[in-house]
Image: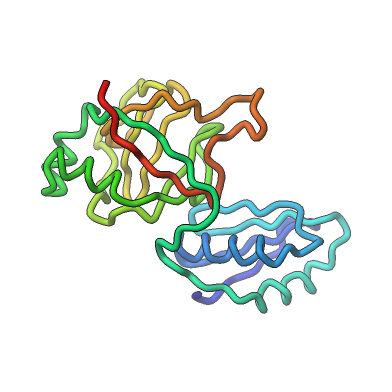
Amino acid sequence: MTVMKVLPCGDAALLIEVDDVADVLALSDAVRTAELPEVLDVVPAARTVLLVTVPGTDLGALRRSVLGLPVRSVPNAIGGETVEIEVVYDGPDLAEVGRITGLGETGVVEAHTAQAWRVAFGGFAPGFAYLSDGDPRLAVQRRAEPRTTVPAGAVGLAGEFSGVYPRTSPGGWQLIGRTEAVLWDADRDPPALLRPGVWVQFVQVTP
């Protein structure tokens, strides 16, 4: 674990800055495992972890507790809940991703489904999860020109992440497939299918 920068965020939260997504996941795991009674919520992001606390918490004491936690990054160590998502791999950018990566279309699908991805954090829209810990060969840049409309259920790649669009929206990710999985349902408990820390296993299916 690299050096953490711990900052007060208002009077009832701490914002912890780290170097990368692997550190975010490791720190989030450590805090959840520690079950610190003053921490109400752990909110990971790309390079930070926000700890929302009980009002009146001694943030200085909590900072010392967090800095003393055994934080260890364990890449691809699958444990806990795993969600399977069935995908039809016929996305409009599949051939281009195959060309960019040198894997070809079949190779892209094999790499995307060969190992589980982990939900690092949420953002962009309710139910959208940034998935990390996938095959590093699938790291591709976003499209030079984003699409004005991406359909709900589109499965994409951008940078080191994969993700599934929970609703129709603009977007610039490279689209490699589609799924009928419902990513966000306000009547479901919890509403989000994919939550930080959960593992995601993509499964190829025919149309």
Q: Position of residue 57 (x, y in %)?
A: 84, 63
Q: Is 115 left or right of 49, judged from the image as shown?
A: left
Q: Position of residue 191 (x, y in %)?
A: 62, 31
Quadrant of the drawing holding the C terminus: top left
> Could you tell me how many numbered marks the image carries?
0
Q: In the rendered image of this protein, does residue 178 appear above or below residue 58?
A: above
Q: Is 96 left or right of 129, judged from the image as shown?
A: left
Q: Is 204 left or right of 184, judged from the image as shown?
A: left
Q: In the rendered image of this protein, does residue 56 appear above or below residue 81?
A: below
- Name the foreground residue: 99 vs 145: 99
Q: Position of residue 76 (x, y in %)?
A: 40, 61
- Residue located at (41% from left, 35% from top): 85
- Residue located at (37% from left, 48% from top): 161
Q: Quadrant of residue 75?
A: bottom left
- Name the foreground residue: 200 vs 45: 200
- Name the foreground residue: 168 vs 147: 168
- Residue located at (79% from left, 74% from top): 61
Q: Position of residue 153 (x, y in %)?
A: 40, 26
- Residue located at (27% from left, 36% from top): 174
